[in-house]
Structures are given as structure tokens and as C-alpha cells.
């Protein structure tokens, strides 16, 4: 089964400017804007094969994050068909399921389960998760609110990559931890690549994209401007921006 | 929702643990809070107004009504916010969102059970014969759970689009408390007005708990079925609306 197929996918959503009824009433009285339609993705047709590492590039607001959200299944296409086969692991909004009052250990279990593992699967990879996160025994039993932001991200990242992904969604991976840890993450990515895991890679760093992805999709105003070999795609993007 | 049992379990534990870890007295607050509320109310109402209270001390009469009310009230206010609070989770990974609401209500039910321990000590001390009657409570409690869950589904999804819902409902709950026979018995109202309480499911639950525990009275079959059907209709409508809005949760938060 092909992991990801976009077939003429359109995504529109509304931005509501008012979050309360008072604001809404004011807006209606003043004939202000109540909501605005955002046409985030336009007629996207795209097939991503198993084991492919594909880079998504484009300027802010081009639709990259919307695309990841659709693949993650948290948002639905407005028109068209999208099929996603395989367990998706999102390395986006890292640590969003973490609760500050719970310990590192408790959060590992909570988040593993949120990411679709069974309790037993989390138990089995618990040691690996802790080792990868480089947190010592004292910290792992402390509430995560006492972690530094680096430690927090390391743990969140570690849980996410140990959730047995078949499709990995990566958004600006280099934002995690110090240089050492970043290198470790990159090695892990290479490892996933070798294992034949499909990776969707969003980044503004052309260097990273060229290093990792043989294929690149360049999004511009919600449309696919280019889809193909990385070098040409990056050149086109750099020229246009 | 069944394949998500692990998820329900862990999110529920998160709700429970996160709360008691923040405070020195921890879990005891779950018991102390309703107990103090009861003491304050019963101090006021046994001195200011006097009600006929089924032959038990007013404090016990009050407590039987107050505990299920607190369960309802805390569930509603917590779940109205549940989706907004978990916004970044909703944007990250998919799982059926009703799990967040279900777990919130479930965690409050845990509190309710814990706080009820005190009530049962009271009943025991007063030598009130409970035996089998305790088990009659279970189906009523189940309906109350479903009723609360249904209303929570509706409010949480609406609150995601307009935050007024949470403020509005704080007020509604205040009013609802007084139109429910919690601090007073239903018979202070003239007989020809009592039918009004039939419109209020919370009044039904509390009346029935009191009947079962304090008067050894089995619930009436007709009103039981009526409330069950009403609750299922509410649950069905709320669930349908919730599921319809669910796909745009991530776009809206």
C-alpha cells in the first residue's frame, strides 16, 4: 500500500476573528470582518511511496504545516481524497501531551499511549526512550515542570521517535536541544531512512533538505510549484524568494 | 472507544494525579472540599431556615444531594474547557476527541467516589440500613454519568468556537444549583408546582438518591425509564454535533 496519496486535495478553513459573542456583536454592528476564508492548499495531487524521504519547502504560509496536519489526520481535506496508510508519528508540536506536574516517567507512558502505543509497547521501549533522551535517574522521577526547556524537548522528541513510526512527520528538527543532541537526532533520522520509514521533512534550511531528501516538493501559495529532484527544486525556490 | 482503553486510562490518571500533586494535602482536598461545603451550608441552613429532612440530620440530608451535584458541576466546568486546554494536542495527533471529555468526567467520578466514603461513614454511624439499596444506586449513577457526559460533549465543542459558553455556563450552574432540591426538600413547594422538578434531570437524580439511601425506597419505574430515554436522546444529539464539529477542531483552536 502506498503510504500517502493526495488526489486533488483542497483545504479551506475559516479564521474567526472573534472568540466571544461581544466581539461578534461589535463586528456585526460595525460591518467588520467576521471570518476569513483561507485557501491553504489548492488542488494538490501527490504520491509518496514507501521509504521515501521527501522535503517540503516553501515560504511561511505556503501550506506546509497544513499539509502535515492533513497527513497526521488532525485536519480533514475540504475537497479531494487523501489516503494515509501506516502509523504516523508527528514530530510537530512536541511535548503537547506532556503535563508539567507529572514526572518524566509518567509523561513517557501518557505520551506513548497518546501516540498510539499500547502500555506494554511503552514498557518495552521505556529504557531506550530514557537513554536516548539523556535524562538521568533523578530527573526522570521529577515533575517535568522542573526540567530545562532543552531536557523537556529531548524527552518529548525521544518518546515521539520511539512510537514505532511508519510515517514520520518532521517539522524543523534542528530546534531541539544542543548541537550534540541535534547530531544524534540526525543520525536517528538516517537510521529511520535506512529502515525504510517514510519521512516527510519540512524545513527552511536548504542545507538540511539537500542533505536528506532526494525529492522535494515546493509549495507556493498552497499550490505545488515543483515536485521532483531536490537540487532543481531548491534552486527554483532560492531564485524565487 | 474501546480500542482506546489505554488512552482513556492514562488521560484519566493524568487528570487525577495532576491535581493532587499540586497541593500539600493532595488527595485529601477531594474529600475535604465537599465536606467543608457541606459544613458551611448546613451551618447556615440549620440555623436560618429549618427543613423537614426525612428524619435524618440536615447535614446528612444535604450531603446526599450535594455530592452528586458537585460531581455534576465540576465535570461540566472542567470539560467545557477540556478541548481548549488540550489545543496543542489536538493539533498534533489524532485520536477520538470524545476521549478527552470522557476522561475528564471519569476523573470527576473518581473524586465523587472518594468523597462519598465520608457519607457512608455518616450513614453507618446513624445506623441507616442500606444493604441492597446501595446497589440500586448504580443504574441511577450510570444515567447521571451519561447525562453529564452528553452535556459536556455539547458544551466543550461549542466553547471551542465561542468562549462565552464557559462564562455563560458558570452562571447557569449557579442558578441550576438553586432550582435543584439540594439544600431544600422538594415538599417546601406547593404540590401543584412540584411537576416543575420533573423537567430537571439533576432534581430527579438527587431525589432518587435520597429516596434510596434515606427512605429505602425503590425508584419508580416510569420516571426511571423517562430519564433514561431523555438522557440517551441528549447523548445522541450531543455526540452527533460533537462528531460533526470534530473535524474542524484543529482548524479552530
Image (tube, coloured by chain):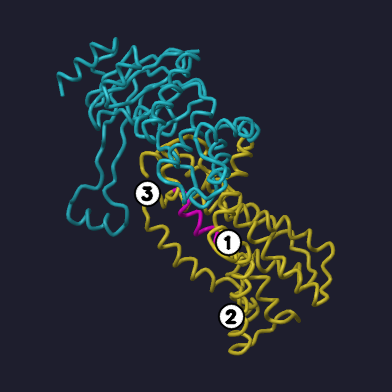
* Residue A2 colored in magenta in the image: no
- Identify the colour of chain A in the image: cyan
Query: Which range of residues does the magenta coloring cover?
Result: B71-83
Mark nearest the camera among 2 and 3 is 2
- Identify the colour of chain B in the image: yellow
> Which chain does tag 1 point to?
B
Q: Is residue A176 left or right of residue A140?
A: left
Residue found at x 40% / y 34%? A92
Whether tag 2 and tag 3 are in contact, CB under 8 A, the answer is no
**In the image as oriented, which residue stretches furthest toward the bottom?**
B47
Mark nearest the camera among 2 and 1 is 2
Q: Is residue B245 visible?
A: no
Residue found at x 16% / y 24%? A241
Q: Which residue is tagged 3?
A: B161
The relative height of residue A188 versus residue B187 in the rendered view (above or below) is above
Magenta: main secondary structure: helix
Q: Which residue is tagged 1?
A: B72
Amino acid at each position: 500500500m502506498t503510504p500517502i496519496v493526495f488526489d486533488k486535495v483542497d483545504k479551506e478553513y475559516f479564521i474567526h476573528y472573534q472568540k466571544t459573542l461581544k466581539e461578534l456583536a461589535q463586528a456585526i454592528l460595525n460591518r467588520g470582518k467576521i471570518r476569513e476564508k483561507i485557501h491553504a492548499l489548492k488542488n494538490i495531487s501527490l504520491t509518496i511511496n514507501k521509504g521515501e524521504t521527501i522535503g517540503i519547502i516553501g515560504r511561511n504560509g505556503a501550506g506546509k504545516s497544513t499539509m502535515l496536519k492533513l497527513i497526521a489526520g488532525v485536519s480533514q481535506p475540504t475537497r479531494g481524497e487523501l489516503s494515509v496508510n501506516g502509523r504516523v508519528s508527528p514530530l510537530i508540536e512536541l511535548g503537547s501531551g506532556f503535563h508539567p506536574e507529572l514526572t518524566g516517567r509518567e509523561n513517557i507512558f501518557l505520551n506513548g499511549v497518546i501516540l498510539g502505543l499500547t502500555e506494554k509497547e511503552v514498557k518495552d521501549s521505556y529504557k531506550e526512550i530514557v537513554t536516548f533522551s539523556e535524562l538521568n535517574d533523578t530527573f526522570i522521577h521529577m515533575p517535568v515542570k522542573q526540567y530545562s526547556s532543552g531536557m523537556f524537548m529531548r524527552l518529548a522528541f525521544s518518546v515521539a521517535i520511539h512510537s514505532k513510526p511508519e510515517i514520520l512527520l518532521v517539522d524543523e528538527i534542528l530546534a531541539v536541544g544542543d548541537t550534540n543532541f541535534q547530531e544524534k537526532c540526525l543520525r536517528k533520522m538516517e537510521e529511520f531512512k535506512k529502515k525504510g520509514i517514510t519521512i516527510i521533512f519540512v524545513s527552511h534550511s536548504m542545507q538540511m533538505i539537500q542533505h536528506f531528501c532526494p525529492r522535494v516538493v515546493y509549495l507556493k501559495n498552497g499550490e505545488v510549484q515543483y515536485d521532483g529532484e531536490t537540487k532543481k527544486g531548491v534552486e527554483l525556490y532560492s531564485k524565487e524568494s | 472507544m474501546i480500542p482506546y482503553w489505554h488512552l482513556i486510562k492514562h488521560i484519566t490518571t493524568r487528570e487525577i494525579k495532576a491535581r493532587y500533586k499540586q497541593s500539600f494535602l493532595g488527595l485529601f482536598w477531594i474529600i475535604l472540599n465537599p465536606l467543608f461545603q457541606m459544613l458551611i451550608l448546613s451551618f447556615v441552613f440549620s440555623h436560618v431556615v429549618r427543613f423537614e429532612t426525612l428524619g435524618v440530620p440536615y447535614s446528612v440530608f444535604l450531603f446526599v444531594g450535594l455530592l452528586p451535584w458537585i460531581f455534576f458541576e465540576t465535570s461540566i466546568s472542567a470539560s467545557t474547557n477540556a478541548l481548549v486546554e488540550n489545543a496543542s494536542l489536538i493539533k498534533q495527533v489524532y485520536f477520538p476527541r470524545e476521549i478527552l471529555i470522557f476522561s475528564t468526567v471519569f476523573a470527576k467520578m473518581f473524586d465523587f467516589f472518594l468523597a462519598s466514603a465520608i457519607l457512608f461513614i455518616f450513614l453507618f454511624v446513624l445506623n441507616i440500613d442500606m444493604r441492597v439499596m446501595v446497589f440500586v444506586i448504580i443504574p441511577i449513577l450510570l444515567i447521571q454519568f451519561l447525562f453529564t457526559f452528553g452535556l459536556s460533549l455539547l458544551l466543550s465543542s461549542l466553547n471551542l468556537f465561542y468562549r462565552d459558553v464557559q462564562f455563560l455556563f458558570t452562571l447557569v450552574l449557579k442558578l441550576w444549583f438553586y432550582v435543584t432540591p439540594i439544600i431544600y426538600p422538594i415538599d417546601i413547594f406547593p404540590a401543584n408546582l412540584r411537576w416543575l422538578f420533573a423537567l430537571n434531570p439533576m432534581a430527579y437524580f438527587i431525589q432518587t438518591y435520597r429516596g434510596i439511601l434515606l427512605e429505602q425506597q425503590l425508584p419508580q419505574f416510569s420516571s426511571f425509564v423517562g430519564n433514561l430515554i431523555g438522557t440517551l436522546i441528549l447523548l445522541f444529539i450531543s455526540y452527533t454535533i460533537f462528531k460533526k464539529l470534530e473535524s474542524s477542531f484543529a482548524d479552530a483552536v
